[in-house]
Image (cartoon, rainbow, N blue to C red):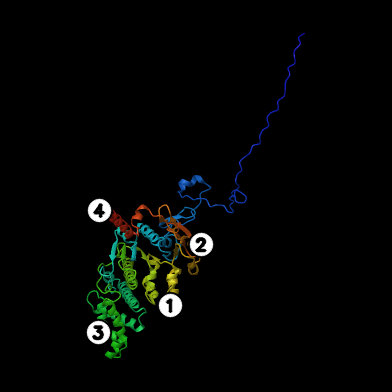
Amino acid sequence: MAITKKRRTTKVAAPKKEPVVRPERPGLRGWLGRGRGESFYVQQPDEWRGTTVQVCGLWPFAIGTGTPMVGVPLGRHIYTGATVCCDPISWFQRAKLISNPSVFVLGKPGLGKSTIIRRMATGLAGYGVMPLVLGDLKPDYVDLINAMGGQIITLGRGRGYLNVLDPGEAVEAAARLREEGFEKEAAQVMADAHGRRHTIVSALLTIIRQQPPTDREETILDRALKWLDENHDGVPVLGDLLRVIQVGPQEVREVALDRGIDERYKAITEHLEASLIGLVGGGRLGETFARPTTNPMRRDRPVVYDVSAIDDSDMDLQAATLLACWSAGFGTVNVANALADAGLEPRRHYFVILDELWRALRAGRGMVDRVDALTRLNRQRGVGMAMISHTMSDLLALPSEDDRMKAKGFVERSGMVICGGLPSAEMPQLTSAVPFSNAEQDLLIGWQDPPEWDPATGREAEPPGRGKFLVKVGGRPGIPVNVELTAVELQVSDTNKLWHDQSRVGRRSRRSLTEEVVA
């Protein structure tokens, strides 16, 4: 019998398993707890735009865009990155978002007011709308219009003249209308030309005197202009109007109520005669408006009136030139519309740009009425308008309460209001014309902050509000947009050329000086 030795075994305890420590994960609103970044609202996701073919596979995450996609692409929504399209003509005619094809732009200098209007003008030109810049003081639009193959009209002391009594193309258009049997339309064209000439002469007298002409003087001017149209050969100038009032034809004497007494007529017209002599004989306004027009405006191409040669210190001449350009421009638009209504020419749409509006309004008491009379166009005419100023204070810094309320009405009646950076003091005046929420006001105030100083380069950084604007339509929430220029636009949007030229001259001078020292 075999005896087997029982093998001795020992039990070894299995190693204890360490508990699995899973990394902590944030909740739906971030890391909870004090100082851990908890968010009390859900962040808005970024948006991308694509066609229905491209995004159909992303269902149910594809939604309609939150910003209008009709009109000129201005830039991207500041918060969502979505494309923002906007211009007064497209929003009025196609999208039906506004009831008046006009835009008023407000913002501090250097933040890009002219840039956003240039973007609109460029895009509208692609749609077949011709931009008309009726007075470029800096100049901001000359390079753009030149690149479009448009007409550049230069005005200034000794540089060009604009005859305010020139009816422009109205006489030729009226003759064409009569030949085609449109007698009523021809009469309307001539009546409009007469009214605009009368308005601009009264405006020039207002600038000279710092107060508007009297009712009697207005009537005398009206009758004298009609006498010139009936008895003068060719295009009259202000000197011809002065001679008519000095001679005093019977029709003019009758409205002057001289009672047949020559001394009484001279006394009545003495003040008016003296003011006209100032316009003709080289007073504060020089001879800019007293000579024949050097470069008549065309209606079939983009146009810019380059008045940058007029110094900023010559406020009266600047205001008078702007008004004269506006009068000539709107007269040309009316002629084009009259011919198109009669079927004699194709319909042309225009985008009229009125920059530095505040300069004309401050020229004298009653100028708001003159500007309003010059700029009123029927919205069915297919004419969009852009008015540009710095702040509401510019519009409300007028001596007369009536003028201040009418100037404020320019903003209230605009189809849309686009605001750049504005100081906090402007908010009460701005919100009285257009409603802005507290968040929108804070946004505008933040955009007007000064730029930071970069110690590495020794230069100022770009201002925080440059290129940023808030598009407001009535009481709707504003659309914040960031305008970024393309490489082509940068070539025609440089408003600091003189500084660049000065820098290049300085570099050349320093280089030549160094070469002389080395030699």
Q: Is residue 409 visible?
A: no
Disc number lying in front (4 or 3)? 4
Q: Image quarter for residue 260?
A: bottom left
Residue bearing the label numbered 4: 516
Please tell me which residue is depicted at 68% across the width and 32% down the height of the picture: 16
Of callouts 2 and 4, the N-terminal one:
2
Disc number lying in front (2 or 1)? 2
Mark 4 and mark 1 residues within 8 Å of each other at the beta carbon: no
- Residue 428 screen position, x and y as percent: 50, 69
Outermost residue to the right: 1
Residue bearing the label numbered 1: 400
- Residue 403 screen position, x and y as percent: 42, 75
Of callouts 3 and 1, the N-terminal one:
3
What separation in Å lies between label 3 and label 1 (alpha carbons)?
36 Å
* Amino acid at dot 3: Val
Q: Which mark is residue 422?
A: none
What separation in Å lies between label 4 and label 1 (alpha carbons)?
63 Å
Q: Is residue 66 visible?
A: yes
Outermost residue to the left: 233
Number of numbered callouts drawn:
4
What separation in Å lies between label 2 and label 4 (alpha carbons)?
56 Å
State the quadrant of the N terminus: top right
Of callouts 4 and 1, the N-terminal one:
1
- Residue 479 screen position, x and y as percent: 48, 59
Q: From what the image shows, is residue 466 above or below residue 32? A: below
- Residue 196 screen position, x and y as percent: 33, 74
Residue bearing the label numbered 3: 247
Tell me the crowding category of disc 1: few under 14, some 14 to 19, or many 20 or more residues within 10 angstroms, Cα based: few
* SS of the residue under disc 4: helix
Mark 3 and mark 1 residues within 8 Å of each other at the beta carbon: no
What separation in Å lies between label 2 and label 1 (alpha carbons)?
31 Å
